Amino acid sequence: VKAINFLVVGVGGQGALLASNVLAEVGVRAGFDVKKAEVHGMSQRGGSVNSHVRWGEQVNSPLIGGGEVDVLFSLEKLETLRYLNMLRKGGLALIGEFSIPPLTVSSGEQRYPDDEQIERALRQVTEDFLCVPTLSLATQAGAARAHNVVLLGALSARIEAAAPETWMQVIEVTVPEKYLALNRLAFEMGRTYALRDNEIKYSAS
Amino acid sequence: VKTLLSGNEAIARGAYESGVRLASAYPGTPSTEILENMVQYKDIVSEWAPNEKVALDTAVGGAYAGARSMAVMKHVGLNVAADTFFYAAMTGAEAGLLIVCADDPAMHSSQNEQDNRRYCKFARVPCLEPSDSQEAKDMVGVGLEISERFDTPVMLRTTTRIGHSHTLVELGERQAGEVEGPYEYRLDQAKYVMVPGNARRRHPIIEERVSRLAEFAESFAYNKVELNDPRLGIVTDGVAYQYAREVFPEASFLRLGMTYPLPPKLVQEFADKVVRLIVIEELDPFIEEEIRLIGIQVEGKSIFPLVGELDPGVVRAAAVRAGLLDAEQAVAPLEVQDLPPLPMRPPLLCPGCPHRGLFTVTNKLKLVVNGDIGCYALGFLPPLSALHTCGCMGASIGVAHGVSKVGVRQKHVAVLGDSTFFHSGMPALLNTAYNRSDTVTVILDNRTTAMTGHQENPATGKTLDGEETVRVDFEQLARAMGIENTYRVDPYDLKQTENALRAALAVDGPAVVIAERACALLPEARAKWTALEVDPERCNGCGLCFRIGCPAVLRSNESDPKTGRLRVKIDPLLCTGCNICAQVCARGAILGREEILRRQEARS
């Protein structure tokens, strides 16, 4: 089994911690040793948040060193760039198309990077990235809040070490029962989106 | 079956399994979740105390009475509880007494990065350090056994990356039997009355105890030697062990599960077997200095940083610089060229935060604000920049009293939250009354301990387990202390708040302003959220409303034809309808809560 290092990033309140909880538990059920590290408290109040999740035969450090992230799982576009240097060359970046302008941007002092700038920066590190319209897919599924589950669905299409049922089983015990159908749909939509992207890539090559 | 648990969840589980009867704590990152998880175990009496000293005195009482007890706090909490820590080290107890202390390297949520292993040496208390959640759980029981065997309090020292990291844990069952009550109080005045005569007899006993503990540490199961390549020997502890193992998979290790006192023979034997001996530890050179005191040459902080937390990347980079690793072997963060400037995203006062109302008024009145520890400390950030000092829990009132006594030209106030006031603000408020200063104290009563994630406190009327209890009336409390001038305001009402502050500042003698408004994130407040709207006809894009620093107030894409400035819009998902921006707007362009509700009603 090959170890996989995931870095989950986003903005406080976006559901990054729920996504990393699911990711960690999926790893456990897939038979890995798993460690997960995050910070609570002051940084949660609308600040930039990150969570390290590691799957492996035996995992030592709960934190991933810079340049050792295999999968950057980003719930917010700007945050992708903030943590981009953590990704290993050629690693996978999954980016939710969700922008939350920081205060300095909303008041007009600073500029939010545009899509072209984001793509240019990404291409320096990896060609393997996928932007997922998380917000619109989640809204179609029934609630914008489920955008994190859409991105988990997309991730599941790229991780062979865990079966799709395993992901859904973990989501079932993580989200409240009344939102289960919604989250199942959100997961499927994200997964389908990424699978279609895979097909396009394979047929092109 | 193994379960993924955070270090904090594991410690709570460990307390349950090892028969702890009583646990008391004051919330503080990164330790808060320990008691939040403890409360699920009904065999344990779990409480929030007003501060860490009370929590530790409570645990001491439980242990004196014969029940396994623990106190939990963040690193700076032990400064508050230090007096108790030292006498408890002198007296010992009748049953296990464990102090869980969570250090915060890198200061993710703290004002300093003090290394509490120093306290252990200072007070002659053994220090245990887990390297993952399994050990965090198991060391609760191990610590209690050491406490009972050596008649000493024991510190279980964690760090942010132990408490907040999840790793796999094998769960056990609760140990029952002799540790369960009821307890017979054993009287022993010579041991428990620390007057000078008794204390003089106790001091040699605790020094001798340290020697016996050092002897015990020689064969302590958690002090582990792993002999591999003899060219490099690494002494390490806590989470640093995990980083070191990852960066140096071939090296030999002495992993210390007990970092005070050190086992001199074990360290000497290990040192003799390796060519180069180094220490990898976070924060202070504590192990390094102890090894030098044994008389062994060692390197540590000459290679690895003293400041901030370690991670595999930091350890690797330092090792390359010191020639311990080849540069080619080391993965490093990528250098991404052509990155646009990234707007920062510091933590903020949330939309609808009642503290924003108070700070909008203190800014208008140009007040100097002696602040305190809590969410309101975020008021120091631009654009509010409203808070001018913040040192430690409860400091605001004492500092403001000092400012007041020497006399300054500017008007100034002390600002602190409800829970912080109970923690250590009360004696300081009494001081403003007793020593008659003109200090104005503003208590931000948001009916919760917000910063650490909504814990109950004596202002909420509920205990840790959700039971109804007394609810303190701040006004009556201030009056009982001899402060006649008290004002109650709603910080969402800027005019009312301003009038009260002006009146409080004008009176001769101390005054208290109680700003009452529930944290906007509490369920009862959430139920009332109503998003405000901007009337584009009236907004000319002046930007006055940005001075309150609310994340829900945004620039729109539409500009005002006269001024050419972009008009304002309000994010309907973030806005709670607190009305502060609407009161600040000089043109009445932001439709207030009443107006919005009226329109909604008319529509339906």
Image: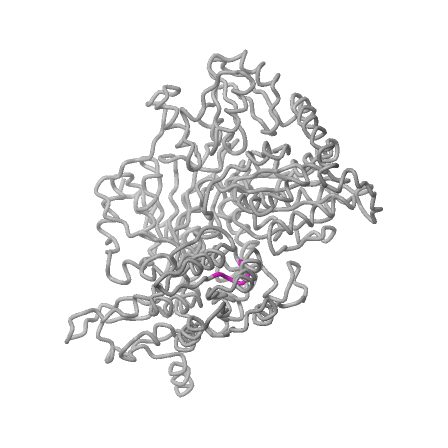
Compare residues B544 and B210 and report the one nearer the observer. B210
Tell me which colouring the rendered structure shows: one colour
B305 up-or-down from A190: above or below? above
Q: Is residue B454 left or right of residue B557?
A: right
Taken as a whole, is the magenta stretch helix, strand or loop?
Answer: helix
Q: Is residue A14 visible?
A: no
Q: Is residue B288 visible?
A: yes
Compare residues B507 and B165 and report the one nearer the observer. B507
Q: Is residue B478 left or right of residue B491?
A: right
Instruction: Choose top left, top right, bottom left or bottom right for residue B47.
Output: bottom right
Residue at figure coordinates x 33%, y 46% from the top left: A199
B12 up-or-down from B142: above or below? below
| Total marks in image | 0
Residue B391 point in image, percent of width and height: 45, 50
Residues rendered magenta in the picture: B416-420
Q: Is residue B362 left or right of residue B588?
A: right
Pick the quarter of the image with the N terminus of chain B. Answer: top right
Residue B592 magenta-highlighted:
no
Residue B96 point in image, percent of width and height: 73, 39
Pick the quarter of the image with the C terminus of chain B. Answer: bottom left
